């Protein structure tokens, strides 16, 4: 039985536990490993079967080191968790496949669409989903919203209500893109976990209403089995090159079912545990497809109105050097 490697594991303790619990539930004798730049500082690395130190994903020897780890420890599938490693892994996918190692992520072309918010804004309309209009900062329409085209975790985002908000720093930031502002009084913010099989067809859709957010991740939320499920199943039933778990950010107006697509993260979202607790076990889908070679059918058996209230938990290491 081959093993699982969660790369750049960092703080993904619950994700690791989900894979561990799922392997136990299925009665499989496989291990969950992790890799990280600083394993000693990674909470997730302290609960896996074994953790490995790797260089930054931008380093020339990153792929060689990961290949070495996977071969030596019989890894069958890699689960990427951070944005910066996605393109690197996808660009080297064949090197892994040639050794029987699969990566649970979309192909390089789709990842590039997701990583560049300008391309994402253009992609949504091609599949029949509206997106906020991109605006020219030199001819502003207020209110408007600015964010980095390659950003994450809600870093360097700005709501600009009038001309005074267009500061010199914002105007001269080459990475910021500007778009129409979506009124949170009208629209609710959702992140939607979606799982795509190896046949590039969607197998699961779980909309998560973001009641409260901390550092770009959901801290309080509710899984809602609402209009969004059927809407996305129709619009995104099959997408070329998409495999594994993706997370879509959108705004939803309940009064007329208007939906505006914002972003796509081509990996497990930070709020995925809510989908898991609601009964949508995408970790099991990956194990069945990537390790057991099974086919996955579409399912909506998860529980509506499941609420997540997040809190911090400590990992204590005694006699630590740092």
Image (cartoon, helix red, strand yellow):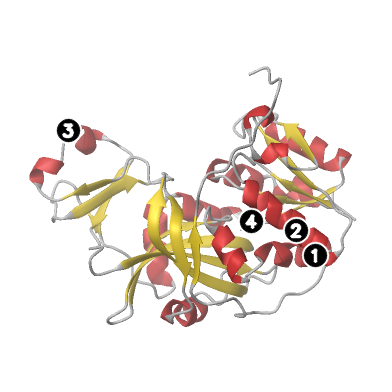
- Left or right? Give the position of 80 relative to 210: right
**Label 2 sits on residue:** 21
- Left or right? Give the position of 289 relative to 272: right
For discs 3 and 1, the disc positioned in front in the rendered view: 1
- Disc 4 + disc 2, Cβ < 8 Å: no
Q: Residue at x 64, y 79 (%)?
A: 298
**Label 4 sits on residue:** 105
Q: Report, in whole angstroms, how far the alpha carbon at label 2 lies from the one at label 1.
A: 6 Å
Task: Identify which residue, 154 or 235, lies in the foreground.
Answer: 154
Q: Label for residue 25?
A: 1
Whichever of labels 3 and 4 marks the residue nearer the N terminus, that label is 4
Q: Report, in whole angstroms, how far the alpha carbon at label 3 lies from the one at label 1.
A: 56 Å
As displayed, is residue 225 above or below residue 309? below
- Mark 1: secondary structure: helix
- Mark 4: secondary structure: loop
Q: Report, in whole angstroms, how far the alpha carbon at label 3 lies from the one at label 4.
A: 39 Å
For discs 2 and 3, the disc positioned in front in the rendered view: 2
Q: Residue at x 20, y 51 (%)?
A: 136
Tell me where residue 121 appears, x and y as whole percent.
37, 60
> Within 10 angstroms of label 2, few (less than 14), some, or many (20 or more) residues?
some
For discs 1 and 4, the disc positioned in front in the rendered view: 1
Tell me where residue 222 appears, x and y as whole percent.
46, 67
Task: Identify which residue, 60 or 158, lies in the foreground.
Answer: 158
- Disc 2 + disc 1, Cβ < 8 Å: yes
Q: Label for residue 168?
A: 3
């Amino acid at each position: 039985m081959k093993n699982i490697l969660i790369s750049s594991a960092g703080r993904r303790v619950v994700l690791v536990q989900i894979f561990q619990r799922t392997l136990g539930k299925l009665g499989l004798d496989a291990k969950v490993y992790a890799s990280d730049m600083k394993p000693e500082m990674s909470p997730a690395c302290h609960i896996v079967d074994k953790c490995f130190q790797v260089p930054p994903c931008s380093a020339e020897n990153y792929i060689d080191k990961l290949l070495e780890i996977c071969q030596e420890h019989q890894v069958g599938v890699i689960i990427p968790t951070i944005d910066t490693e996605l393109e690197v892994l996808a660009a080297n996918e064949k090197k892994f496949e040639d050794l029987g190692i699969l990566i649970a992520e979309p192909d390089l072309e789709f990842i590039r669409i997701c990583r560049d918010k300008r391309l994402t804004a253009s992609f949504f309309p091609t599949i029949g989903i509206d997106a906020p209009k991109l605006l020219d900062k030199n001819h502003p329409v207020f209110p408007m919203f600015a964010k980095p085209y390659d950003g994450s975790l809600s870093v360097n985002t700005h709501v600009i209500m009038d001309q005074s908000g267009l500061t010199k720093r914002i105007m001269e930031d080459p990475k910021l893109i500007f778009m129409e502002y979506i009124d949170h009084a009208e629209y609710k913010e959702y992140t939607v976990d979606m799982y795509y099989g190896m046949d590039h067809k969607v197998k699961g859709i779980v909309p998560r209403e973001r009641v409260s957010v901390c550092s770009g991740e959901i801290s309080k939320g509710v899984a809602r089995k609402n209009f969004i499920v059927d809407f996305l199943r129709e619009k995104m039933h099959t997408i070329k090159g998409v495999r594994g778990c993706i997370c879509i950010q959108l705004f939803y107006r309940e009064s007329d079912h208007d939906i505006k697509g914002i972003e796509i993260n081509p990996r497990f979202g930070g709020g995925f545990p809510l989908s898991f607790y609601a009964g949508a076990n995408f970790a099991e889908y990956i194990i069945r497809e990537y390790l057991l070679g099974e086919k996955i059918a579409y399912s909506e058996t998860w529980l509506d109105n499941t609420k997540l209230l997040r809190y911090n938990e400590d990992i204590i290491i005694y006699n630590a050097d740092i």
